[in-house]
């Protein structure tokens, strides 16, 4: 499936790098909550305790839109700071180099900020391997995956049909958006349990090692 695809849509956090691992993820979520707490916004139990800063961002867009620009800026800053120290997922850089070698374009499709993704790519001298970076739309968390917006943008940038690409991602939302957009999906599973979850969600294939794709 991977070899037959004309292009690769690649999630960033996970398949390329574990961008904000614990405990830094909780620090990022706390920072994202801070602008709303400063405005005395009442957070529900989940948003008040989650370590997922993107969940906080989504919630802010609907429940505290007046704080959204600041919450978004905090998330951008946290991800960009993380990109300055993030280490590669095993095999990820080899995969990018191999795709470049065989003329298979790669587009990063991520719910992370474009500025953070580009900071990571520049730090590791990977920019030339990437055809485009499609990060989360500014001011529109509702268009993040599993909404098909970013995947469709990637396909338009490549000028190919969905069934000629392959999407590589590690989350259930990656599988969901792939199925919705009609793009074959390879799930990246760091644990056997996640592999089972990705298969149950409808991934066309699952790998435990990005290096296998290279």
Image (tube, helix red, strand yellow):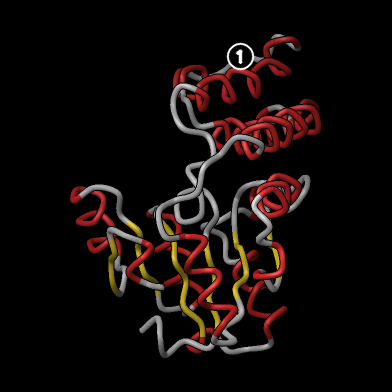
SS class, disc 1: loop
Residue 202 lies, with reference to residue 81, above or below; the image says below
In the rendered view, does 173 fall on the left or right side of 187?
A: right
Q: Position of residue 86 (x, y in %)?
A: 56, 39
Instruction: Say which residue appears at 54% left-offset and 69% top-offset.
Output: 96
Q: Quadrant of the N terminus?
A: bottom left
Q: Quadrant of the C terminus?
A: bottom left
Q: How many marks?
A: 1
Q: Position of residue 74 (x, y in %)?
A: 73, 28
Instruction: Say which residue appears at 58% left-offset and 30% top-offset.
Output: 56
In the rendered view, does 212 fall on the left or right side of 128?
A: left
- Residue named by callout 1: 42
> How dense is the environment of label 1, judged by Cα within 10 Å: few (below 14), some, or many (20 and up)?
few
Of 125 and 139, nearer the camera is 125
Residue 3 position by quadrant: bottom left
Q: Position of residue 197 (x, y in %)?
A: 24, 54
Of 142 and 28, nearer the camera is 28
Instruction: Say which residue appears at 50% left-offset and 22% top-offset.
Output: 26
């Amino acid at each position: 499936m991977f070899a037959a695809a004309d292009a690769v849509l690649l999630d960033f956090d996970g398949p390329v790098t574990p961008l904000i691992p614990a405990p830094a993820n909780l620090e990022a979520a706390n920072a994202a909550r801070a602008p709303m707490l400063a405005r005395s916004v009442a957070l529900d139990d989940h948003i008040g305790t989650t370590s997922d800063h993107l969940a906080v961002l989504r919630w802010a867009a609907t429940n505290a839109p007046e704080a959204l620009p600041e919450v978004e800026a905090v998330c951008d800053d946290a991800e960009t700071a993380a990109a300055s120290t993030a280490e590669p997922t095993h095999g990820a850089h080899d995969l990018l180099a191999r795709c470049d070698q065989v003329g298979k374009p790669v587009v990063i499709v991520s719910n992370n900020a474009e500025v953070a993704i580009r900071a990571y790519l520049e730090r590791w001298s990977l920019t030339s391997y990437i055809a485009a970076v499609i990060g989360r739309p500014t001011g529109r968390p509702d268009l993040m995956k599993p909404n098909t917006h970013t995947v469709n943008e990637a396909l338009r940038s490549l000028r190919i049909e969905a069934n000629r690409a392959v999407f590589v991602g590690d989350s259930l939302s990656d599988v969901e958006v792939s199925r919705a957009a009609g793009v074959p999906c390879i799930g990246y599973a760091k644990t056997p349990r996640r592999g089972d979850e990705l298969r149950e969600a409808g991934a066309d294939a699952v790998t435990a090692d990005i290096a296998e794709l290279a």
